Amino acid sequence: VTTAARPPTPGASGTVYALLDGERVVRVDEHAVAPIGRLEGDRGQSMVATADGLVIGAEGAHLLEFDLDRGEAIPIPAFDEVPGRDGWENPAGPSPDLRSLAVAPGGAWFAGVHVGGLWRSGDEGRSWTAAIPPGDDVHEVAAGEGGRVVVAAARGFGWSLTGGDTWTWSTDGLHGPYARAVTLDGDTAYVTASTGPSTTDGRLYRCRLGQPFE
């Protein structure tokens, strides 16, 4: 199950959507789940809400825009044309994954590819620029107010205060550098870390951006 929430607007509450079994898109109501549509082709791996609908990351590192009114997924062709994608290689599967997406409050989109780096779009997916190279192996991305963007990666925790233009990296306070998941609450980040991809020693940490983890 992958979920995405559209924030509330004046006079209306927010809406929560879920991607079930990598193929079914549903709306989560108070006491029920309402089917919206189904993906055709590659299975979905990640999903995020935008001002206009949903964006879904699919197997093979493809991006889809999901039309909530029609219940259909429409490919975003510009992401299939980013430079260097022929060299993306997933050590855990036959094709690269697109398992992390984020939309900043200012509208920038971020797509994390395993393993193909972190990509940013400022025009709703029509063009993309590289924000973090593939070698840093980004596992998850989250975005917040004030240009804050954070990532969990194989090399540790990375954060940007410039909307992804510049990055700072840290493992200060972590028992291991392999960060797998991250979320952001204001200027506080919550991160899971371990000693490697096959470890049994994973722990949860938090920090203020720029401060050691606890």
Image: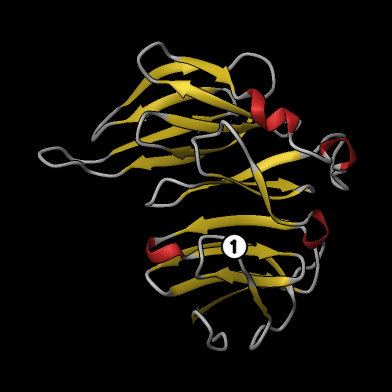
**Coloration mode:** secondary structure
Q: Quadrant of residue 90?
A: top right
Q: Position of residue 137 (x, y in %)?
A: 77, 58
Q: Is residue 76 above or below residue 169?
A: above
Q: Position of residue 207 (x, y in %)?
A: 50, 81
The residue sitting at 51% across, 32% down in the picture is 55
Residue 202: in sight, yes or no? Answer: no
Q: Secondary structure at mark 1?
A: loop
The residue sitting at 50% across, 79% down in the picture is 209
Q: Quadrant of residue 26?
A: top left
The residue sitting at 57% across, 70% down in the picture is 159
For this view, does 19 lie left or right of residue 115? left
Q: Position of residue 171 (x, y in %)?
A: 68, 81
Tell me the crowding category of disc 1: few under 14, some 14 to 19, or many 20 or more residues within 10 angstroms, Cα based: few
For the residue pair 24 and 62, the one nearer the viewer reads as 62
For this view, does 8 lie left or right of residue 207? left
Residue 156: in sight, yes or no? Answer: yes
For the residue pair 190 and 211, the one nearer the viewer reads as 211
Q: Amino acid at mark 1?
A: Asp
For this view, does 210 lie left or right of residue 134? left
The residue sitting at 42% across, 60% down in the picture is 144
Say which residue label 1 marks: 165
